[in-house]
Amino acid sequence: MTTQGKVYLVGAGPGDPGLITVKGLECIQNAEVIIYDYLASPALLKYAPKNVELIYVGKKGGDHTLPQDGINALIAEKAGQGKIVTRLKGGDPFIFGRGGEEAEILVNAGIPFEIVPGVTSAIAAPAYAGIPLTHREFTSTVAFVTGHEDPTKDESSIDWASLAKGIGTIVFLMGVKNLPNIVRHLTENGMNPETPVALVRWGTTSEQVTLTGTLENIAERVKAAGLKAPAIIVVGEVVKLRDTLKWFENRPLMGKRIVVTRAREQASDLLKQLSDLGADCLECPTIKVMPPEDWTRMDAAIDRLSDYDWIVFTSVNGVKFFFNRLFEKGKDVRALHKMHTASIGPATAKKLLEFGLNSDIVPETFQAESVAEAFKNESIKGKKILLPRAEEARPVLPVELAKMGATVDEVTAYCTKQDSENAEMLVSGLAEKSIHIVTFTSSSTVKNFRKLLPAGDAEFKQLMQGVTVASIGPITSDTAKELGFDVHITAESFTIPGLCKAIQQYFKRV
């Protein structure tokens, strides 16, 4: 017997993936089939289960991947197979989203469904442009109007006279192509030609562009700017408030497309901080962090932890992989109770603290050399130091500690391998000159990024021409220069916040 399926008609919001509702996100996470639109943010699909069936039915500029009747039939078909279907629609499913039509089909087919409202672009795009739709000093009325009615209608069902004279703020959705007609209808029905107008394209995303004018000149301005769909149109005196209230487009990295090369499991902090500064981030991890192929030396060190006086962690990964292996061997943090600890950088120290251990040494700067400098204040002659770290790590630290009289046991906690998952998208973006910045957070990310690009020097230089290269520190910068990159930004504080600050300061100057 086939289990009955169910459909969730979910509003994905206006473009910023952060504006998805909690329930909408749950529907994505629990779906067996996701049927999604052009305007539903692709970033939301990363929350879908690994085995989910993804079906794109987007409509872009009149080019329909699947007509509405076909979409309706597809939703019913998948639910009829006993599957949990999430129909992911841009904005809100009931605001010009044809969600009502899809729901009617489900009712007729006897398929259970739920409506999950979304944040409509009619509200969100003006808000991100600094335009409140209502304001006590301007208007208490607002109307949402389709920018293109069903072309098969004999006559318009829009009461243009009432809109022109009785509504303070009018928001038109999907009306860019029809803008001259909208202007004509409003002015012919008595609206003042000097009424302010704004168009917000790709509202709430890093590509957001806002163009303002009046009914008298807005069509000309849009044509001159080449502004195209998707965009919403706001008509009313509230548009004047944009000059005072605009906030989203003022962010320092607005419109910059930045490649994040860090390993996927570590990239979230960098992605969030750059996105908060207005950047459009392209996640293109060049490395995968993996357990070592052979645990023999690590296991031997764990079995005799009582022999060591110090343990030094040089990265978050070193902490994570060491403790994972410690726990797998049936031990816990009590096995380190006699040991002193040192960590490179606050992020590493923070990760260590998650396991209940404070760092006795956290150098002010975040290089291996600085740890060696910090140890000069400690008596480590004759002491045994355990150093769990990357297989490919530089030899500076163990060499310096050995010079100070310590016995250093360097063991592999993890290794990095090349990740070429998004190589095609990366090369395509560089060739199209749609990428503005590439970030490197380690020498490994540099080396593996270079391997993803053509080997020939001329083609490599052509792809990187005009691209700003940002590095987390001098060692990473040196590696990049050795491999032929022009490095424009080197962070003074070798951390993710330090890198973001350096990028921000650089673009203030240029």
Image (cartoon, grey):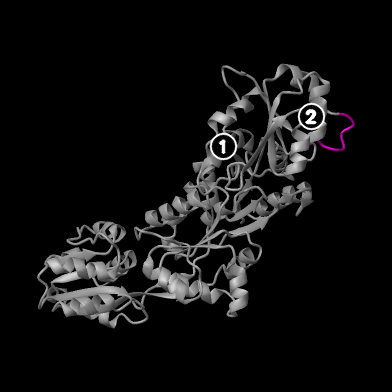
Q: In the image, what residue occupies the spot 56% across and 41% down? A: 249
Which mark is drawn over residue 210?
A: none
Which part of the image, by quadrant, shows the N terminus? bottom right
| Magenta highlight range | 147-155
Which residue is most to the front?
Answer: 509
Q: Secondary structure at mark 2?
A: helix
Choose between 296 and 246: the one closer to the eye. 246
Give x and y (percent) for residue 500. Answer: 43, 54
Residue 327 can be seen, yes or no: no
Q: Mark 2 sits on what residue? A: 183
Asked if marks 1 and 2 touch (Cβ < 8 Å), the reply is no
In the image, residue 398 above or below residue 56: below
Choose between 221 and 381: the one closer to the eye. 221
Q: In the image, what residue occupies the spot 13% across and 65% down? A: 337
Q: Mark 1 sits on what residue? A: 128
Give x and y (percent) for residue 333. Answer: 20, 64
In the image, residue 299 above or below residue 342: below
Query: Residue flagged by tag 2: what amino acid is it?
Result: Val
